[in-house]
Image (cartoon, helix red, strand yellow):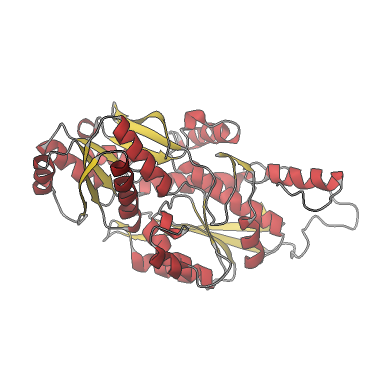
């Protein structure tokens, strides 16, 4: 908190400051015992009430590897809060927005999830979505209901920012205030940083493909603009049909056009592994790079470790090795409970849930508007990701982008890159 426009007593500043330092921390302390005849229940709260939180993520298909760890992060935060916030019990439901038929998120399913949440008066926060295209569907439905939405993974800039796809942006928020927030850095940072890295690695001619979804197309477009700005040549930026069984003829085209890099804007479940397999069968010397939608062990496993060796990926956020304090504790505790290193997005699930729980603590009542306002006022949060705030658009102030390369069958951190 950086308020200095009004006069507060030193005691008030200390108390308020201590609340902010605790916010987003993931560790709670027992409340001070109330005097006889008093209660610890916050003002405006009915003691013993129940608040429901839900998440909407693809729990079917190749993205499940990533969302399993996000949901594990949600549960860790809930456990640390003893499933309570604001003097009320917290229940959590894990909803799937994917279908077995699609093998990934599904528009009709996401619409149904968002509508169900909007119409349930017990639901105070919607934790999701994973895919930016799904967010485009859910945001206006939840906005009309005044229901806060916190994403651990959406990165398409047009969900919050002007100058990318204003036609889309203008449809997302029919009412004020905005209801959407994300704890992960947007692709106007990631796409540009990836292009800078590609240039630094010496690539000069890029062939860009995207999966024609909001996230994939958006990050591909940003990569294209920055790669050109750095002096690189973009041969093409084309959409693919992710349902195609193979892309060898397209890879012949990539090879014949003289590309030294194939950049794919998309996901592990929207064609990424097959593109890499076909690229390496046709043109093994052409490098492959993608955003955090493919930076997952599921991508390496689906493509094959030998095929994926040397592929490049980026992730919005710090390497776990560089997280300190609450972030380092999260890594240690997660590995102890789950038996494996967390996916890069796991900590974002943990942080998103902590934001929700601390906002409920701050609001002190079962009220969507109050909880939404409390989330929007998240400032100088000292959480697992470091110290950050939500800006006026609902975006995090963090801008760290990690660069990774597949080495020995897994993505290995290389360095941090900048926009």
**Is residue 31 something that shows in the picture?**
no
Q: Residue furthest top?
A: 408
Q: Residue at x 47, y 43 (%)?
A: 346
Residue 169 in sight here: yes
**Residue 344 percent coordinates (x, y):** 43, 39
Q: How many marks?
A: 0
Question: In the picture provided, is 224 more to the left or to the right than 67?
Answer: left
- Is 60 rendered above or below residue 192? below
Q: Check the image and name the residue furthest to the right.
A: 36
User: Residue at horizontal 46%, vertical 71%?
Assistant: 115
Tell me the quarter of the image containing the C terminus: top left
Nearest the viewer among 231 and 11 is: 231
Where residue 359 appears, as percent x and y from the top left, is 65, 55
Q: Position of residue 336 (x, y in %)?
A: 51, 32
| Residue 181, placed above or below residue 298 | below
Q: Quadrant of residue 315?
A: top left
- Residue nearest the viewer, comparing 105 with 71: 105
Closer to the camera in the image, 1 or 363: 1
Q: Is residue 236 left or right of residue 60?
A: left
The image quadrant of residue 327 is: top right
Depicted 116 relative to depicted 22: above or below: below
Residue 196 position within the rendered picture, expressed as x and y whole percent measured from the top left: 35, 37
């Amino acid at each position: 908190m950086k308020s200095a426009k009004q006069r507060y007593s030193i005691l008030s500043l200390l108390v308020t400051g201590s609340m902010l330092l605790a916010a987003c921390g993931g560790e709670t302390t027992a409340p001070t015992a109330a005097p006889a005849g008093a209660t610890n229940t916050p003002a405006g709260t009915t003691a013993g009430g129940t608040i429901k939180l839900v998440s909407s993520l693809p729990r079917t298909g190749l993205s499940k590897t990533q969302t399993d760890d996000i949901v594990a992060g949600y549960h860790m935060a809930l456990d640390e809060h003893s499933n309570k916030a604001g003097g009320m019990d917290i229940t959590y439901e894990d909803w799937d927005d994917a279908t077995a038929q699609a093998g990934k998120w599904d528009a009709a399913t996401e619409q149904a999830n968002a509508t169900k949440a909007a119409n349930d008066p017990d639901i105070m926060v919607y934790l999701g979505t994973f895919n930016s295209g799904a967010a485009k569907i859910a945001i206006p439905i939840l906005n009309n209901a005044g229901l806060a939405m916190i994403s651990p993974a959406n990165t398409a800039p047009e969900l919050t920012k002007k100058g990318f796809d204003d036609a889309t942006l203008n449809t997302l928020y029919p009412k004020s205030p905005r209801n959407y927030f994300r704890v992960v850095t947007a692709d106007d940072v990631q796409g540009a940083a990836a292009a800078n890295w590609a240039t630094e690695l010496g690539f000069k001619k890029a062939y860009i493909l995207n999966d024609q979804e909001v996230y994939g197309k958006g990050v591909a477009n940003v990569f294209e603009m920055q790669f050109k700005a750095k002096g690189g040549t973009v041969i093409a930026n084309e959409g693919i049909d992710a349902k195609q069984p193979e892309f060898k003829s397209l890879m012949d085209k990539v090879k014949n056009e003289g590309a030294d890099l194939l950049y794919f804007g998309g996901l592990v479940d929207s064609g990424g592994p097959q593109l890499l397999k076909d690229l390496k069968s046709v043109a093994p010397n052409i490098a492959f790079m993608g955003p955090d939608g493919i930076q997952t062990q599921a991508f390496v496993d689906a493509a094959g470790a030998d095929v994926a060796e040397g592929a490049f990926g980026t992730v919005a956020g710090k390497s776990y090795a560089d997280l300190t304090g609450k972030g380092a504790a999260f890594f240690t505790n997660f590995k102890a409970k789950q038996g494996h290193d967390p996916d890069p997005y796991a900590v974002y699930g943990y942080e998103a849930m902590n934001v929700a729980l601390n906002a409920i603590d701050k609001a002190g009542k079962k009220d969507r508007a109050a909880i939404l306002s409390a989330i929007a006022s998240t400032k100088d949060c000292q959480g697992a990701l470091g110290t950050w705030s939500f800006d006026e658009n609902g975006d995090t102030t963090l801008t760290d982008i990690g660069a990774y390369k597949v080495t020995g069958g897994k993505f290995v951190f290389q360095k941090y890159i900048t926009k």
